[in-house]
Image (cartoon, grey):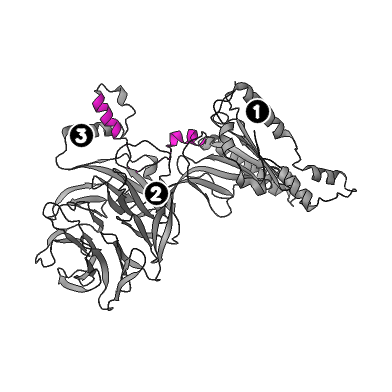
Amino acid sequence: MKITWESGDWPGARIEPAITYLAWVAQTDRPGHGLLGVGSDSGSVGITLTDLHPTDDDNGRYNFNLRGHHSAICMVTWNRVQTKLASCDSSGVIYVWVRNDDRWSVELVNDRGVKVRDLSWSPCGSSALICYEDNFVLIGSSTGQRIWSNSFPTAITVTAGVWVPDSRQLVLGFASGNIHVLSDQGANITERSFTTDPIVKLACSPTNTKDDRWILAMLTSSNKILMISAFDQIDPLVYGSAHTVVQMQWNSDGSILALINTNHELVMLDREARVIHKETLALPKDKPLSALTWAHEGRAVIVAAGGHLAIGKLLLGVPFLFDLVTYELWRYLGSESKKVDSLPIPVKEKNALRSLDHHIIRCRIPRLDDLCSFVCSASEARCYCTIKPLSRGSHSYVLCMEHLGGLVPLLVGRQVNRFLPQFHISLHPSDGQVLSTGSSAQVEDLSIIPRPSNGRNSLWRRSKRQLRALMSRHVRPPRPDLRLVQVSSNVWCTRFSITSMSPKYLPDFLGQVVYKTSVLHLQPRQMTIDMAVLGGMQDRTGSPLFFLTMHENIDDFEASNLHSISSCTSPATSEAEVDDLAVLVSQQRFRDDDGLTREERALFLSAHHYVQPWTREESLRHRHKEHHRWC
């Protein structure tokens, strides 16, 4: 057997919080596709689509970050029949997530206030088994009803639980080394003892099609794995591990048991407890292995260490020489096929090398080399992101793309003026370190702030600035200018302008927002938005000529007709229409610079005159006359 590992430097192989648990389920309506459930240390649950073979991107949503837990996720498990995901955090709160159209929502919540030791769905999908730390065992239906529950004496400790493949029996493991076999209604069937060491984990394989038997694997505290195929078996098969076993799981047909240990090793056992594969994973050694799962019916395996992932495809049996040579050549090329066209090999071999670039976990996160073009160009696919502050009081924020229940940083926004809302938006540094986590707001004109100071302090401050500038100029390596956009506003926060700080990638004018208020509330509040549509027809300077101007009442803003947007950005627009459009936009952009309405301007210019307020009928009549205009 051989495992071909994917490249570890692709953007989706690393997320910010640590991964604590992995679980995969197949999509019954789409062969070759599946859903990967991820539990993170931040309390977020991720559901991400997986593809075994290359698939055309449909621009649909492929990742869901589910928030609701307030502590780290300790386990996630799938109901394979009903495609429900149960997640449990370290405080014992259990959520059952179900998909509704294009979103996932909470269907059931279980909170006893006690931590959970084990959680598993029955293979038929109708029941769930929950083992708590206070020796309380619960069997509940998938709809939330309690089927059976029992509180065991404190003298014996329930440590694990698992269902038998027929869903009519379940097995409980105890700290005394015994196992209890119960029916799905809680009736006691039998009790056996195979070891004196406490049982840590139980894993029951699916029924094998060759011999029509299942295998129960029992992990003990002494890192021994005991395997039995019947409850009346006398001598179990034993495998002893030299390192602490973190997790173990059977594949879909019950032929291979995979386990990971604290030595960063992936070990695979057959049904006779014999080692058939063992290798050390190329994951960061400073982070222990934390999660393991099979994917795509046992043809792939996914292992996590902290926030890093390792994904491999299995070549079962004796692999072909063609597959081995192709994989080694792909690794020699740097685990990518960019230079494959320069090789003097046939087309079949070139296509085989290109197929190794495919990643099972779907991801649209750009590489570092393509990050600038990704954020500066329009895309048909929607990106789901989260904005989080760097630290309290830092006035800096990071725009992160959601992936696998975690976040991947893309852009950094910093406030550069303490008096005016002015921000600089730049690319996230490639080294992963934000340039400044402290207060990044700078005062542009210090002379307007009166402060008592003597000459000595002024000289000391000036010397520090000069020394800092000297160090930055001659000692520190030059930092690349990653700034892209500047967002600024006037003092009254009624006009916001968005301009480019990188003319190489973006046009000078990107957009502006004009907000008009009414002092006497004589008419509805108004907002005018001008936006540059990237990717439209370009003029001689290379800047896009399309601008989208929106003049809306705030009360009717959500009722805008989106159909008119497509007519404005249609590629069939002639150059003459584009020129007229640019003139109209420039006129709209520079009129009413004071940001006041006609009534407000008359009020301030003739303060000694009394402005007669409109009646309710006149106000409503004027409001109905306001129309939506798209330029």
Q: Residue furthest right?
A: 608
Can you identify the residue that label 3 sits on? 323
Q: Which amino acid, mark 2?
A: Leu
- Marks 1 and 3 in Cβ contact (< 8 Å): no
Q: Residue furthest left?
A: 234
Q: Earlier in the sequence, mark 2 or mark 1?
A: 2
Residue 371 colored in magenta in the image: yes
Between 619 and 604, the residue placed more toward the observer is 619
Can you identify the residue that label 1 sits on? 581
Classify 10 Å Cα crowding around label 1: few (below 14), some (14-19), many (20 and above): some
Residue 549 colored in magenta in the image: no
**Does 624 sit left or right of 338 as displayed?**
right
Quadrant including the C terminus? top right
Residue range (magenta): 347-375
- Residue 223 drawn above or below residue 578: below
Q: Quadrant of residue 516?
A: top right
Q: What x and y, as percent, mark residue 386?
A: 50, 49
Q: Earlier in the sequence, mark 2 or mark 3?
A: 3
- Marks 2 and 3 in Cβ contact (< 8 Å): no
Q: Which amino acid, mark 1?
A: Leu
Can you identify the residue that label 2 sits on? 404
Numbered badge on residue 28: none
- Residue 417 shows in the view: no
Q: Which amino acid, mark 3?
A: Asp
- Distance from Cα at disc 2 to Cα at disc 3: 30 Å
